Amino acid sequence: MTLARKLSLLVAALVLVPAAGTYWLVGTSGGTQWLVERVSNMAPAGLTLGTASGSLLRGVRLHTLAWHSDTLVVEATDIGIASDLLPLLQRKLVISDVGAASLKLQVFDSNEPTGDSEELSVDLPVSINVTTADFPEVRYISADMERNGAVGFSGSLRGARLKLSQLSLRS
């Protein structure tokens, strides 16, 4: 085998192996499950991600997601997310459709004075655009009331600035 042929095979392998790995990661259910497991391990305390199916190319279904803190519980089931990955190269995440079969928000009274509480700060390195979000079964629970309804919205998050272009609340 000539040196030129060996170099050609080496270059082909250097291109094909990362391309195949990338496709496995974003184009297969196994790659999506692997990514969700990695994210779950790095998630902050209180956040629990369930199992996932689908692929980042064709849409992901997360079976459960939960956030538990001293003052808030958020639980969602059967979450579907469809996104476009190409804008990520420009630090933009475009989510064309997101929704959940059910969403539960439970707020607990805090004994802390509101002036001393730490504000949630979200300053992401990517901007996020959501074309359509639909949550047909939302249950809101607080100490003095319980409501059922539906929520839909579209908007964007850039840095720490949230802009809603549409919001619909139905009860």
Image (spheres, rainbow, N blue to C red):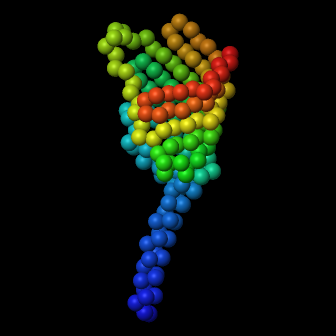
Q: Quadrant of the C terminus?
A: top right
Percent coordinates x, y for residue 77 in the rendering: 59, 33
Residue at x 65%, y 19% (from the top left corner) = 169
Left/right placement of residue 125 relative to residue 170 reads left
x, y percent for residue 33: 51, 50
Above or below — where is 25 with respect to 136? below
Q: Is residue 16 visible?
A: yes
In depth, the one of 136 and 162 nearer the eye is 162
Of the pair 10 and 25, the residue shown nearer to us? 10
Establish if 135 lies above or below 80: above
The residue depicted at 55 percent of the width and 37 percent of the height is 129
On the image, the x and y values in percent for residue 9 come to: 46, 81
Question: Eyeballing the image, is 55 above or below 149?
Answer: below
Q: Residue furthest left?
A: 116
Residue positioned 68% across, 18% down in the render: 170
Side of 137 where 119 appears, left or right: left
Picture residue at 62% right of the left edge, 36% below the top? 131
